[in-house]
Each structure stands twice: as structure tokens, then as C-alpha cells.
Amino acid sequence: FFVLEDETNGELAGCCAIEGQVGCEVPFYNYRLGTLAHSSVQLD
């Protein structure tokens, strides 16, 4: 698992992972782009 950090402000800029597989003759690629935001009313 890899994480990309914005060094100017310390925020998470992105992440990715590598998953190994045995016995597969054709490479498989899977991409997902998205934004996920969580907030708490109690902490605001």
C-alpha cells in the first residue's frame, strides 16, 4: 500500500496498492478515481 502526501501541508494526496496474482496470463488493471469526505457534527 502506497500513500502520496502533499509535503506543503501534510495532507493525503492519493494512495494505491499492488496486488500479486499467480497463473494469470493477461494483466488486469483496475482504476477508481473518487473523493471521499467524512465529517462529524459533534467535532464541528
Image (cartoon, rainbow, N blue to C red):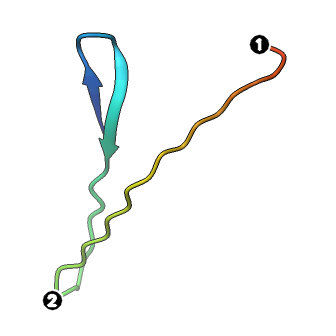
Horizontal arrangement in the rendering, residue 32 relative to residue 25 (left or right): right
Q: Residues within 10 Å of mark 1 (few under 14, many from 20)?
A: few
> Where's residue 21, x and y in %?
27, 72
Task: Please tell me whether residue 31 is drawn above or below residue 26 in the rendered image.
Answer: above
Placement of 14 over or under 43, stated as above or below: below
The secondary structure type at the circle numbered 2 is loop
Mark 2, residue position:
25
Question: Looking at the rendering, which quadrant does residue 32 occupy?
Answer: bottom left
Amino acid identity at mark 1: Leu
Q: Which residue is mark 1?
A: 43
Residue 7, relative to residue 29: is it above or below?
Answer: above
* Residue drawn at 24 percent across, 78 percent down: 28
Q: Quadrant of residue 29?
A: bottom left
Residue lying at 54% horizontally and 43% vertically, measured from the top left: 36
Q: Residue sitting at 69 percent across and 28 percent down?
A: 39
Q: Marks 1/2: CA distance?
A: 50 Å
Instruction: For marks 1 and 2, give the one nearer the viewer.
Output: 1
For the C terminus, give its image quadrant: top right
**Which quarter of the rendering shows the N terminus?**
top left
Residue type, mark 2 in image: Glu
Which of 15 and 9 lies nearest the eye of the viewer? 9
- Disc number placed over residue 24 in the picture, else none: none
Question: In terms of depth relative to the viewer, which is nearer, 10 or 41?
Answer: 41
* 44 and 24: which is toward the camera: 44
The answer to whether 43 appears left or right of 38 in the picture is right
Sequence order check: which comes first, mark 1 or mark 2? 2
In the image, farthest residue toward the bottom: 25
Please tell me in which quadrant of the rendered image residue 41 appears.
Answer: top right
